[in-house]
Amino acid sequence: ETGVTQSPTHLIKTRGQQVTLRCSSQSGHNTVSWYQQALGQGPQFIFQYYREEENGRGNFPPRFSGLQFPNYSSELNVNALELDDSALYLCASSPTDSSYEQYFGPGTRLTVT
Amino acid sequence: GQNIDQPTEMTATEGAIVQINCTYQTSGFNGLFWYQQHAGEAPTFLSYNVLDGLEEKGRFSSFLSRSKGYSYLLLKELQMKDSASYLCAVTPSGTYKYIFGTGTRLKVLA
């Protein structure tokens, strides 16, 4: 059974640019959640996707958007990058949208300069 | 709204027992999770409590009191590899998202 994978591992971008982060769910999981984790902080919920539809959103501006594909993989897009967007971005998958247990990927470390 | 409080840092000795506390205030509550996170790595699941009481899993135990909005994670027979951050998270009613605390950095000393 393949776990949750994310790409790229690390990324450096300049303020104002756009970025796309990718996540492949664990086999059999149809729900994906994205979290932002700043250094020394706990993860903050960005949004969740269930069967290609957004299924809940945290307190993040519209420049944070996402997609889920028919194979349940997912993308997180961030436009107009700001310095404060520098963080570890974590993807977590669940067997269904009614499952509380989430399995996290290794994360993408984004640095905005 | 939701608020979760954990101590920022704790230090303990190899072989000892340590208790990491978590208090929370939420408008509704489905359950409470504990995750372990080593530096630069993804959080890994430790425990899930939905009913009051103690859940034991080997060296790790987790306790929940819903009426008091309180949980703790108990680590026994500490090992050097237990040095990590421990994250408390709740799932508010009607959602399946996690609300995380800031995490407790545990240092285990020889």
Image (cartoon, coloured by chain):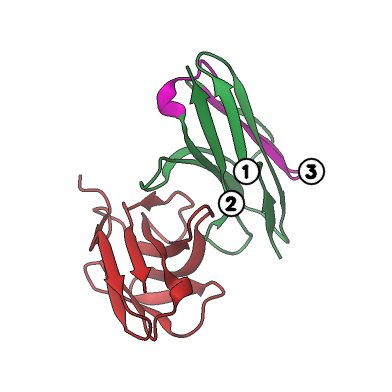
Q: Is residue A31 visible to us here?
A: yes
Chain B color in figure? green
Residue tagged 2: B102
Labels 1 and 3 within one chain: yes
Which region is colored magenta? B60-82
Q: Chain of mark 1?
A: B
Q: Secondary structure at mark 2?
A: loop
Q: Amino acid at mark 1?
A: Thr
Q: Specify the chain shown as red.
A: A
Q: Chain of mark 2?
A: B
Q: Is residue A27 magenta?
A: no
Q: Residues within 10 Å of mark 2 (few under 14, many from 20)?
A: many
Residue tagged 1: B8
Q: Residues within 10 Å of mark 1 (few under 14, many from 20)?
A: some
Percent position of residue B54, x then y: 63, 28
Quadrant in the rendering for residue A7? bottom left
Rounded to the nearest angstrom, the CA distance separating label 1 from label 3 is 24 Å
Answer above or below: position of A39 versus B43: below
Percent position of residue B61, x then y: 56, 26
Labels 3 and 2 within one chain: yes
Q: Secondary structure at mark 1?
A: loop
Q: Chain of mark 3?
A: B
Answer above or below: position of A21 versus B105: below
Question: Which residue occupies 47% across, 16% down?
Answer: B110
Q: Secondary structure at mark 3?
A: loop
Labels 3, 2: front one: 2
Q: Amino acid at mark 3?
A: Ser
Residue tagged 3: B67
Question: Which residue occupies 50% across, 40% down?
Answer: B85
